[in-house]
Structures are given as C-alpha cells and as structure tokens.
C-alpha cells in the first residue's frame, strides 16, 4: 500500500523520505485535497499571471550556454509550421527540467563532474494510471478505494461526487506492475484492470466501456513520475543537485523538501526566484 506513495517498494526508499511521508503532524493527508474544477486551473492561473505572450510552449531546450555574464538558451520549436532552432538570452535562468531531461540538455560550460554524477544516480518512479469507464457504479461507495495484490495494484473512484450512471475507477500501478501495463495494448490493459475486479463484482469486465492510460516512465520529457531517492541519497546527492551552475539555478519537485508534490515544486521555484531577486538588488 505504501508503495503507491513512492512509486516503488518502500524497501528502495531513503529512510528520511519515507519518514517525512508518514511522520507529518497534519491530521490531513495532502491527497485529501482536490483542485475544484480540475488541476489544469493551476497552470492556467500561472499563465494568466505571467502573461501567455511570455510563455513558449512546444519548446525543447537543447543547449544552455553561459558567456560573459549572459545565459543563452537554445531550444527546438515544434510550434506548428515554425519548427526549427531558436535562442533566448537572459541574465539568469531557473531550470526546472526533471533530472533525466536535464541530462539530455547540453551545458556549456558543462555541469561540474559532481553535479553530473549526482544526476546520473537519481532514478524516477514508474507509475501507470489506467482509468476505465464502467456503465454502472457497481462499487457503490462514493469514496471507494481498494488495494489489491494483482497487476492493477490500487483502485480509486475518479468520478467521486460527480453525477451520472456511468463511473470511472482508476487503477494506479507502480514499479514492475506499471511496466507490465505500459507494454500492453489498450484492449488488453482494460481486460486486466476490469478482470482484476471480478472478486468485487463479477460483472466488472462486461461493464467496462473504455480506457485511458498513461505511463510516466515512457514520457520522453520526464522519463518517470517523480524522483525516487534511495537510501543515502537524500543527504548525499540532493544537496549537490540543488547547487547553482553559474547563473543557472535549479528548481523542481526533485529538489523540494516536500518532494513528489506540486507544492514542493512551487516552493523550490519561489526560492530560486527570491535568490535571483536578492542577487540583483
Ligand atoms: C501519477 C502521478 C501522481 C501524482 N499525484 C500528485 C498529487 O496527488 N499531488 C501532488 O501535489 N503532486 C502529485 N504528483 C506530483 C506532481 O505532478 C509533481 O510534483 C509536479 O508536477 C512537479 O512539477 P515540476 O515542475 O517540478 O516538474 P514537471 O511537472 O515534471 O515539469 C517539468 C517540465 O519540463 C518539461 N521539459 C523536460 N525537458 C525539457 C526540455 N529539454 N525543454 C523544455 N521543457 C522540458 C517537461 O515536459 C515538463 O513539462 C503526481 C505525479 C504523478 C506522475
């Protein structure tokens, strides 16, 4: 059950990260909170405040170059017809690329050998989410969730509090189970996810209508769900990954005190921005 928190068995997790997850004093689990209206509201609100004219989508950074006090960021644009390479110049940069993506970016001057070695050691969790629409909500309880020892691993009710006869249960699988799902077709994934529910209701496979799946370990821009600090790594490689590289500062979920969560990611971004503002004043 705990492995859904980390994305791998707790046996592989830094004791400090595991303790931080469970020794929290708040009576509420952060998973108790949902964003009313959907999570994209957060990104949309950021876009509004930053100004969408200041945001470049579909821009894959390939090179971060520092020369004579200026940082140049070269990116490949996949924006419609204007595909090609472009460059931005800045006084400083906050880089929030997940570590596997960071390793694909060329830095000139290169990252220090310690930084490069730390990045190469950090792995990311394998997580696959498989949401199946059923013609009927056979699970009855609004707050239905279930941990199983089957491939589907963990189920939760995704249409909780929403009207309608049909409903969605999401199967959230980690580690090897996530890799099994990632290797299947949608049809077979749906057979596994609905079939694993036969002990709850034998009609589940017949009621299953459609599946939408995502495996973060196959995402080419993150190569995983979130960072997984192994024993010894929290105090070993994390402080190295947090070090600035000249005028390039680093932020993101993988560097956060509250690692693995949006709030943590945002806090690291705010800390990096504050550091830049202080340097400039
Ligand atoms: C299955 C799952 C469930 C989760 N559940 C929760 C939850 O319930 N609550 C919670 O708070 N958090 C949850 N999280 C974690 C949350 O999604 C992350 O902590 C958060 O998204 C991290 O933000 P970030 O900006 O650091 O990284 P990301 O959101 O990974 O953003 C990094 C971005 O960098 C882009 N990128 C990569 N390479 C390049 C490049 N070369 N050039 C340009 N862009 C690049 C990527 O495309 C990506 O958009 C969950 C994550 C997963 C995978």
Image (tube, helix red, strand yellow):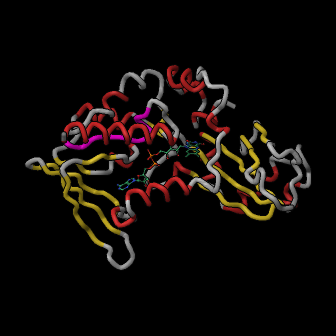
Instruction: Reply above or below: 62 against 157.
Output: below
Instruction: Reply above or below: 30 against 86.
Output: above
Could you tell me which quadrant the C terminus lies in?
A: top left
Residue in view at x 58 percent, y 24 percent: 11
Instruction: Reply above or below: 273 against 22.
Output: below
Residue in view at x 54 percent, y 27 percent: 12
Left or right: 251, with 66 as reference point: right
User: Where on the picture, by quarter, is residue 135?
Assistant: bottom right
Magenta stretch holds residue 144: no
The image shows a total of numbered marks equal to 0
Q: Nearer the viewer, residue 128 or 81?
A: 81
Q: Nearer the viewer, residue 243 or 50?
A: 50
Which residues make up the magenta segment? 247-256
Instruction: Reply above or below: 249 against 57.
Output: above
User: Where on the picture, by quarter, is residue 48?
Assistant: bottom left
Residue in view at x 30 percent, y 65 percent: 76
Magenta stretch holds residue 248: yes
Percent position (x, y) of residue 211? Answer: 71, 61
Percent position (x, y) of residue 238? Answer: 37, 29
Residue extending farthest left:
68
Residue extending farthest bottom:
81
Residue in view at x 64 percent, y 52 percent: 36
Percent position (x, y) of residue 4? Answer: 64, 36
Left or right: 103, with 212 as reference point: left
Percent position (x, y) of residue 242? Answer: 32, 33
């Amino acid at each position: 059950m705990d492995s859904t928190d980390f994305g791998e068995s707790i046996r592989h997790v830094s004791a400090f990260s595991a303790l931080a997850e469970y020794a929290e004093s708040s009576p509420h689990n952060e998973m108790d909170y949902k964003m009313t209206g959907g999570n994209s509201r957060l990104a949309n609100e950021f876009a509004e405040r930053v100004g969408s004219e200041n945001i470049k989508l579909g821009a894959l950074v390939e090179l971060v170059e520092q020369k004579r006090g200026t940082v140049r960021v070269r990116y490949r644009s996949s924006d419609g017809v204007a595909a090609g390479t472009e460059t931005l110049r800045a006084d400083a940069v906050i880089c929030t690329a997940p570590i596997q993506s960071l390793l694909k970016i060329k830095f000139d001057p290169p990252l220090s050998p310690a930084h490069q070695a730390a990045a190469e050691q950090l792995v990311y969790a394998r997580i696959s989410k498989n949401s199946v629409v059923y013609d009927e909500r056979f699970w009855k309880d609004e707050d239905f969730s279930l941990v199983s020892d089957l491939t589907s691993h963990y189920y939760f009710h995704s249409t909780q509090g929403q009207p309608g006869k049909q409903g969605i249960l999401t199967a959230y699988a980690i580690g090897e189970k996530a890799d099994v799902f990632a290797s299947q077709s949608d049809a077979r994934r749906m057979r596994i996810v609905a079939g694993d529910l036969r002990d709850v209701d034998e009609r589940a496979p017949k009621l299953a209508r459609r599946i939408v799946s995502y495996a973060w370990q196959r995402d080419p821009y993150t190569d995983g769900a979130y960072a997984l600090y192994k024993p010894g790594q929290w105090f070993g490689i994390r402080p190295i990954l947090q070090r600035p590289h000249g005028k390039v500062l680093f932020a993101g979920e993988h560097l956060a005190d509250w690692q693995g969560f949006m709030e943590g990611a945002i806090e690291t971004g705010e800390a990096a921005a504050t550091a830049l503002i202080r340097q400039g004043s």
